Image: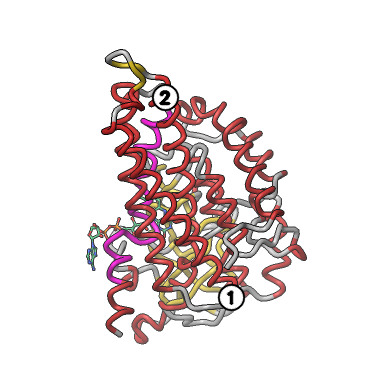
């Protein structure tokens, strides 16, 4: 076994890490204050190819496999998590349905604009009455001639306020239960009957906007049906599976940044006449962080490799997401502790990470739902 990432991936990783640490982090204060990402940062991200990570080269993307994408996500985790959230909601769950299920005409129509960042994407399944219980969505799509008429409300949809394209999951045949679910490509900015609700006021991940998406007799052209009609819950949810591996990689990057900040602080902060790094209590916290990082990294690398081999990763993607996001919460807590009062101050990136990371245990399936998936697969 060779645990080294190929050299080209290490180069891409280094470029993205440099962008996150030296360009995006420089504007972190502005992102926090305005709850928005400066457009020039999005342009620079597009020039680096970040919007086209998962899009094949023939449609203008970078066409990285899962290992490559996750290597980039880990590097992205080392900078502002809200900025990373915009990119990953687009490049991961916003894009993967179209790449996997789209027909040639749909791909030619949307993917080039998505790769260039002109069209930002998102994915919408969650509704006010169905979060973890995603099989129970109520948004309906009724076929009338050459359109589907959508009615219902999605909420907490990442990127919705800025999205040019959303993959929306709706019920096409209520009589078929969870098998009566279909996916649609919806252009929220130009489709009458689709409106964006109030932007959510979140604890963290500023700049990564989410909101309600409301459908009132919204007519979606039949050619925007993604995959077969009555695609089914399992296939629709399959769009999220690879996203979970990406979240594990982002979490690993975030932990690495928190450890780096903690090591620097521990070496330079003196108490009782010596650097706090001399105290075994502090050393143990650093050691525990390192264990969390190494185990999370090996896991995402293994699962990404499995995806690239064409293996079924439903269980292992949950294992990787659950482990890395739970570890990240512990690492963030330890980073605050190592930094002392400074870790609680807005001027410290540690305070921001402490808030931002909390979301990763909730979206794309809570930690409890990951355990449900793992246990069901063991018992099947
Ligand atoms: C900022 C943000 C961005 C998001 N972005 C998107 C997006 O882009 N697209 C999208 O579709 N959705 C998105 N979501 C929705 C997200 O995926 C859901 O919030 C998540 O799946 C949990 O659903 P819920 O909030 O309704 O919580 P609930 O399902 O109500 O869960 C509440 C608690 O009950 C527990 N629970 C529920 N069922 C079980 C069970 N069977 N066993 C054990 N415990 C259980 C949960 O683990 C949790 O602890 C986003 C959410 C947030 C907060």
What is the quadrant of residue 319 in the picture?
bottom left
Q: Quadrant of residue 38?
A: top right
- Tell me where residue 106 appears, x and y as whole percent: 67, 70
Asked if the residue at tag 2 contacts the one at tag 1, i.e. Cβ–Cβ closer than 8 Å, the answer is no
Note whether residue 201 is visible.
no
Rendering coords of residue 129 (x, y %): 27, 62
* Figure quarter occupied by ligand 1: bottom left
Asked if residue 286 is positioned above or below residue 338 in the image, the reply reads below
Q: Residue 267, which numbered label?
A: 2
| Dominant secondary structure (helix, strand or loop) of the stretch shown in magenta | helix
Ligand 1 within 8 Å of the CB at mark 1: no
Residue 45 shown in magenta: no
How dense is the environment of label 1, judged by Cα within 10 Å: few (below 14), some, or many (20 and up)?
Answer: few
Magenta-drawn stretch contains 357:
yes
In this rendering, position of residue 112 left or right of residue 182: right
The N terminus lies in quadrant: bottom right
SS at mark 1? Answer: loop
Question: Which coloring applies here?
Answer: secondary structure
Q: Bounds of the magenta span?
A: 349-372
295 or 66, which is in the foreground?
Answer: 295
Q: Please say whether residue 84 is visible from this viewpoint.
A: yes
Q: What residue is pinned by disc 1? A: 309
Alpha-carbon distance for marks 1 and 2?
43 Å
Residue 105, given in percent of the width and then of the height, sits at 71, 72
Counting residues from the start of the chain, the first of labels 1 and 2 encountered is 2
Front residue of this view, candidates 38 and 155: 38
């Amino acid at each position: 076994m060779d645990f080294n990432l190929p050299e080209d991936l290490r180069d891409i990783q280094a470029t993205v890490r440099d962008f996150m640490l030296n360009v995006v982090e420089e504007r972190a204060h502005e992102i926090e204050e305005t709850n928005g990402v400066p457009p020039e940062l999005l342009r620079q991200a597009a020039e680096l190819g970040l919007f086209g990570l998962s899009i094949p080269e023939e449609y203008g993307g970078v066409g990285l496999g899962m290992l490559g994408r996750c290597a980039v996500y880990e590097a992205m985790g080392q900078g502002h998590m809200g900025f990373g959230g915009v990119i990953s909601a687009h490049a991961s769950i916003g894009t993967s349905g179209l790449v996997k299920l789209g027909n040639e005409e749909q791909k030619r129509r949307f993917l080039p604009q998505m790769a260039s960042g002109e069209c930002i994407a998102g994915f919408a399944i969650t509704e006010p009455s169905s979060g973890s219980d995603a099989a129970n969505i109520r948004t309906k799509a009724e076929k009338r001639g050459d359109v589907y008429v959508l009615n219902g409300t999605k909420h907490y949809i990442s990127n919705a306020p800025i999205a040019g394209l959303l993959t929306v999951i709706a019920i096409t045949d209520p009589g078929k239960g969870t098998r009566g679910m279909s996916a649609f490509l919806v252009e929220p900015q130009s489709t009458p009957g689709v409106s964006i609700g109030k932007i959510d006021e979140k604890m963290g991940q500023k700049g990564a906007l989410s909101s309600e998406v409301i459908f009132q007799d919204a007519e979606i052209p039949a050619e925007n049906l993604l995959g077969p009609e009555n695609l089914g819950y399992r296939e629709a949810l399959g769009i999220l599976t690879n996203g979970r591996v990406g979240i594990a990689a982002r979490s690993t990057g975030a932990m690495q940044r928190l450890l780096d900040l903690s090591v620097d602080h521990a070496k330079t902060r003196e108490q009782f006449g010596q650097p706090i790094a001399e105290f075994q209590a502090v050393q143990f916290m650093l050691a525990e962080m390192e264990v969390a990082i190494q185990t999370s990294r090996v896991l995402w690398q293994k699962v990404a490799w499995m995806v690239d081999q064409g293996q079924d990763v439903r269980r292992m993607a949950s294992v990787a997401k659950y482990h890395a996001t739970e570890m990240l919460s512990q690492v963030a807590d330890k980073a605050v502790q190592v930094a002392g009062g400074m870790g609680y101050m807005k001027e410290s990136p540690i305070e921001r990470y402490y808030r931002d990371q909390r979301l990763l245990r909730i979206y794309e399936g809570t930690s409890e739902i990951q355990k449900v998936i793992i246990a069901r697969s063991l018992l099947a």
